[in-house]
Image (cartoon, grey):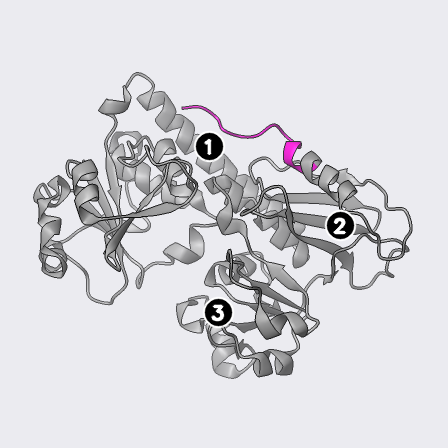
Amino acid sequence: MTDRRLPLGAIALLFLLLAASCGGGRSGGAVSEGEADSMRYATNLAIVRHDGWIEVRLRNPWDTAAVLHTYLLVPADADLPNALPEGTLVRTPLRRAGVATAVACGLIAELGCADAIAGVCEQEYIHQPDVQQGLRSGRVADFGNGMNPDIERIMATAPDALLLTPFEHSGGYGRAERLGIPIIECAEYMETSALGRAEWMRFYALLFGAEARGDSIFAAVERHYLALRDSVAAHCSAATAAALPSLLTETMYGGQWFVPCAQSTMGRMLADAGAANPFAYIAGSGSKGLAFEEVLERAGQADVWLVKYNQSAPVGYTSLARDYRPYTQFRAWRERHIWACNLDATHFYEETPFHPDRLLRDLVIILHPELMQDRRTRYYLPLTE
């Protein structure tokens, strides 16, 4: 298996060139070139350190020749530098942040900065004990729906930044953009590799004054992920692609079955786990919705099938067939090779974006159990009857 990492510093250099072409400083003075951090995996993030402040530039994942956002991080206890380029000024560390996603809440808590979460959206999906306790006591405000947050509550809470998720063609953030509060665009989900997405924790750690902690967590994630990947690569080196276990993921949703494209985060993780992706022929970095018949044709003989569900009662083979009888046509159903993740009982979505090593470990245990002495999985369990 080949290493797809870009050369060190290549993306940061690209962003520096973009910065030079995007012009204007706030005060019209000269801006020093700064020193770029080497991003090892993230392709849409560049961090450049200047004297007394840090520039963070996000590449637009939907138009990679453009810049999505530029942030100018200046310590709250320092005077503003004489010359700053165009960008959103953010005083760090953040002390009162509004956070729209459970993923970000989980990382902020792991960074040791849960006290800085002043408000959240979609509180029903957040499992962090500190946040839930804060919601009950009133210390943390409930901003409601992430796509249409309660602006009055945001104004009453007066956060010093809002962490929101950007979407293509969304039309922006509506009234939130007019509040004068810095909006941090959490676009890490658009990275095309698991470690690329996880590396964004270095940016979030800078926002909350936890740089050393963020670097330490990422170094551990990287080390564990690469060790698992390399172990699988060595194990599978003599095998042909046809000999690798084939893996089907997910179930029907809204009349379609969304499968991982070849260059998607999950598609690449399947390759790192030594799995054959039945849909690797589909180019792209996201997922693609297919009709049931096409999924059955391509993956009907898949060796293993991974499903996710969200309910208190466990799902079994019988209930899965009751939900949609054609599922029984898959070999993995007939031969009892289905593994399930109950989202109600795990922190799958909160943990795996910044800890892809944990998910990769589950996949290796399922696909190549002979490589693992400890075969206790974190998220997936064999489907019950």
Note whether 239 is above or below 326 in the view shown.
above
For the question of whether residue 96 can be seen, the reply is: no
Look at the image and tell me in which quarter the C terminus lies. bottom left
Point out the stretch of residues depicted in magenta. Answer: 1-12
Residue 2 falls within the magenta-colored stretch: yes
- For the point 17% across and 59% down, the residue is 315
Disc 2: CA contacts within 10 A as few (<14), some (14-19) or many (>=20): many
* Relative depth, front residue between 197 and 363: 197
Q: Amino acid at mark 2?
A: Ile
Q: Earlier in the sequence, mark 3 or mark 1?
A: 3
Mark toward the start of the polypeptide (2 vs 3) = 2
Does 42 lie within the magenta span?
no
The residue wearing badge 1 is: 226
Percent across and percent down for residue 312 are: 24, 67
Left-right relation of 311 to 104: left
N-term-proximal mark, 1 vs 2: 2
List the residue tagged with mark 3.
147
In front here: 60 or 160? 60
Q: Main secondary structure of the magenta part?
A: loop
